[in-house]
Amino acid sequence: MEEKCGGDTPYLSSAMLEAEHAENRKVAIEQFKKTRKMGGELFSKAFLEKLEADIEECFDSYQKVNNGKQLFSSFRTPIAMIITLAVLYIFQQAFLFTGLSCFASLCSTAVGLIFITVITWCYSRSTGNLREISQSIDELADNLWQNVRKIIIFLSSFLYLES
């Protein structure tokens, strides 16, 4: 379950989460029943009930974590994308103002692609569908965030050395 809906994974729809839970529960109980035990049926029945209770407790915990991801997901991706949209839009307007319509068209195309990316990310996060695409968009935004941060640090250190 940790692989499917743990802390590092994006939101998983409730139906998919319950299906994963049912499958993992079934596998765990089958594994428990297959394993040789000492103490007889009555003794192992108590442990089976304990196992089922622990599985349900873990499922409740995973449900809470998963629901928290839907409501309070990482804000890094939308912030990075919206800032990128704003910067590209400003560049587009500046290029149009100076008469460089070819560069303005490139910026306009990039704005459109990033807008589609943001919509896809929002859809994926709210429904739990297209999880792999959502993870890829998150990685892209993280890389963008890190690279822009490095450039800002470099420029600020360069400006500091100049003064």
Image: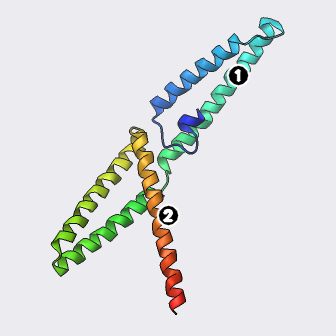
Q: Count neighbours of disc 1 (C-alpha within 10 A) and say few if under 14, some if 14 to 19, many if 20 or more.
A: some
How far across and how far down the image is residue 75, in percent? 47, 57
- Badge 1 marks a residue whose secondary structure is helix
Disc 1 and disc 2 in contact, CB within 8 angstroms: no
Q: Residue at x 27, y 69 (%)?
A: 89
Q: Quadrant of residue 113?
A: bottom left
Q: Secondary structure at mark 2?
A: helix
Left or right: 121 in relation to 35: left
Amino acid type of the residue tagged 2 in the rendering: Gln
Give the answer, above or below, for where 87 lies relative to 136. Answer: below
Residue occupied by mark 2 = 146
Mark positioned earlier in the residue sequence (1 or 2)? 1
Any part of residue 134 in sight: yes
How many numbered marks have been drawn onto this rendered protein structure?
A: 2
Residue for badge 1:
51
Q: x, y percentage for residue 51? A: 70, 22
**Label 1 vs label 2: CA separation?**
44 Å
Q: Is residue 4 left or right of residue 93?
A: right
Q: Quadrant of the N terminus?
A: top right
Residue 41 in percent (x, y) is at: 77, 6
User: Residue 24 in the image: x percent, y percent?
Assistant: 58, 24
Mark 2 is surrounded, within 10 Å at the Cα level, by few (under 14), some (14 to 19) or many (20 or more) other residues, namely: few
Q: Farthest residue in the bottom direction?
A: 163
**Splitting the image into 4 quarters, where does residue 110 fall?**
bottom left
Residue at 49% in and 51% down: 73
- Camera-side residue: 16 or 67? 16
| Frontmost residue, 59 versus 6 | 6
